Every structure is written in structure tokens, then in C-alpha cells.
Amino acid sequence: MTAKITVALVGLGFGAEFVPIYRDHPDVGMLAICDADPDVLARVGDEFGIAERYTSLDEVLAQDQIDAVHLVTRLPDHGRESIAVLSAGKHCASTVPMALSIEEMREIVRLQTVTGKNYMMMETAVFTREFLHCRALFDEGRFGAITFAKGSHYQDMEGWPAYWRGLPPHFYMTHAIAPVLSLLGTRATSVRCLGSGRLPDGRAAEYGNPFPAETAIFELEGSDAAVEVSRTLFQATRSYSEAFAVYGERYGFEWPQIEGESPVHFLRATDAGDDARGDGIEARRIEAPDRGDLLPPEIAGYTGSSVFADGSHASFVQGGGHGGSHPHLVHEFVRSIVEERLPSIDAVTAANWTAPGVIAHESALQGGMPLPIPAFDGADPE
């Protein structure tokens, strides 16, 4: 019988969404929870029957029985906290982004190598129903050669915690670029990016970022296709959208542009000749199937239900429930530990998905200057 692991979930705002999934996963023997707010800690612990409770990450890391830590904490702290978890000899999962600096990314990659502990970035976009369906079509060879791809993430962050104010938009790019890089199995090698709009001086001062929006064009390793990514955080009157699109010579796929809509397929009619002038392309809306069949029955039901019964948490509401991705993320992280293998979004992959946004912002600050994006391969831990 496979040995069960002990997991600590740190951060119970949006993080509460994952509590029953870990609790019910057949390979998790015990779940501990952690939050600095004692009222939140008590409420979540009582609601889900979790007895093991801590009020700081330091407390969690001091517990020898805890094998793995899932961080659902403040965005600016992800890099530092992930380094602390790996340095303590524990497996680490972290919500996006991986970190806000190339230096922190390099250190996390190094620590994954030298400690032998797993790091996984919990990127929801590549475990949604829409992406899993697109992946199946891509693996069937439906697209043909890829001509162009794009990603976008529009989100109004007014009223969110203070650390979001003035954040460079592409620092939080992974939802938009990860599906394309994952699908094509490549990384971005260079970027040209322009900032758009202008933040008020008081808001711009927090990160030294003047832009409420940014648009980037990436070159890809081993691919003739370019990728466009646009991101907004403030001052853009647009409802939430987290989307990607891939266009091949025979087939195209667009993630829904408005939350609650269905994806769109574009098919080239088989009887369209060279002179069809584009009218041989047909658009269809389709329903991406739920993929609870990929999960243990104990957690399969969580692809279609939220812990926040009233839909109260803004991240879950704005993200349309994140496409049923949460139990898939938990299962991949847990199974990678049990099976003693790297997770699908390990430190190298996470860095190759996060670094493009950091370098894109540098390009924007330099007026669109083309900049190279560092590669991460984990080969040299020194």
C-alpha cells in the first residue's frame, strides 16, 4: 500500500478552496492548515474538521511530520516563501506567479535540484476543461502547423489588497501565456513589449511601474509562430477574461472571451479550394467536457463545485471557477510526491512560464526594446 503524505495548506482566503480536496485525496493521510488570522483559521478548521492548525509558515516548517506545503499567500511573498519551504526539506506547491524576480526563480530551480524536493507552480489555466479539451485536439494532430497564438488576461483589480496596486501587469502573466507554451511544448526566447495607458503617480510609485496595461510579442524556441500576450490590471473598462487562442493551418481554437461562454472552434471546410477567399472556414461553439474521469473518485466531484458556497471569493468568481482545475492541480502535486517524480509544472517549467512576464515588463520600461529571456534547465545547481 502506498504511504500517505502530510500536507500543510498555508493561506486560507482563496486557499480554503483547496481544503476539502486535500482532506479527501486518497494519498493524503493528514492535512494541516495555516493562517495568520486566528478567526479565519478557526472558521475553516471547524467547517472542514481540520484539527492541525498553525498561525505562521515558520511554525509549519518546524514540524517534521509535514511532507509538503501548498502556499496560497501574498503575491510578493511567493518566491521568498518557496525558497524557505524547499530549504526546510519539504515539497512545495505555490500559487502563481512563481516569483517576481529572475534571481528568486533561479534559486527555486537550484533548490529543487539540490534538495530532491518537488516544486510545483499551481497554474490553473493548464488544467481547465477548456485547455484539457484543446490539448486532446492538439495531440490528435487536428491543428496542423501552428501559425499564430495569443493569450490575454483582463482583470479589474480595484479594491483588491494593497500589494496589487501598481503591479506591473505582466508580472502576473502566467494565466495568459502558460496554455500556449504548454500546448506547443516550448519556451519564449525573446520579447518586445509596450506599456499602455498611464497610472496615477501615487499608484505607479509602489513598483516603479507607470503602466496599467502591457502588450508583448514573444519569439518561441523551435517554432515559426509568434505569441501575443496582453494584460490589464487597472483603468480598462472590461469584464474579467482569461483566454488563449491557437491558430493552425487546418484548425483554430479560442478560449471563451467572456466568462460563461463556450469555446469556439474554427474548421477549414474540406471542399474549400485555393480561391475560397476565407469563406471555407466555419466557426462552431462547443462544450468542453468535464474531466473528472482523470481523478480519483474521492475528489472527482470537486471539478464542478466550489468550497465557497455563496461564490464569495473574488478570485473564484472572476475566474469563472477556474474551469474545474483545482482537483487536477492537487492530484498532480500529490501524485508526483508519491510516485517520486517531478510534477508537470516543476521549477524549470514554472520559471520558463514566469520569466517572460518579468522580462516583458523590462522591455516596456525601455520603450519596447527587444530583450532575451533567460532559459532555465536545472542542469547546473551551482
Image (spheres, rainbow, N blue to C red):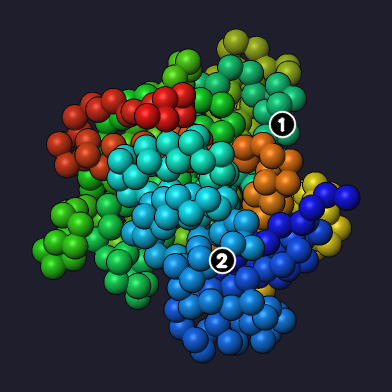
CA distance separating discs 2 and 1: 45 Å
Q: Which amino acid lies under the numbered mark 1 shown in the image of this protein? A: Leu
Q: Secondary structure at mark 1?
A: helix
Q: Nearer the viewer, residue 64 or 236?
A: 64
Residue in view at x 40 percent, y 65 percent: 74
Which mark is on residue 137? 1
Q: Mark 2 or 1 closer to N-term?
A: 2
Q: Which amino acid lies under the numbered mark 2 shown in the image of this protein? A: Gln
Residue in view at x 81 percent, y 59 percent: 26
- Give the image quarter of residue 18: bottom right
Q: Residue 215: x and y, percent?
A: 31, 41
- Give the image quarter of residue 327: bottom right
Label 2 packing within 10 angstroms: few (<14), some (14-19), many (20+):
few
Q: Which quarter of the rendering shows the C terminus?
A: top left
**187 lies above or below 179:** above
Q: Residue 204: x and y, percent?
A: 17, 60
Q: Secondary structure at mark 2?
A: loop
- Is there any visible trace of residue 171 in the rendered image? no
Q: Residue 379: x and y, percent?
A: 46, 24
Q: Residue 113: x and y, percent?
A: 50, 34
Q: Are marks 2 and 1 in contact (CB under 8 Å)?
A: no
Taking the image as shown, residue 126 lies to the left or right of residue 352, namely right
Q: Nearer the viewer, residue 125 or 152?
A: 125
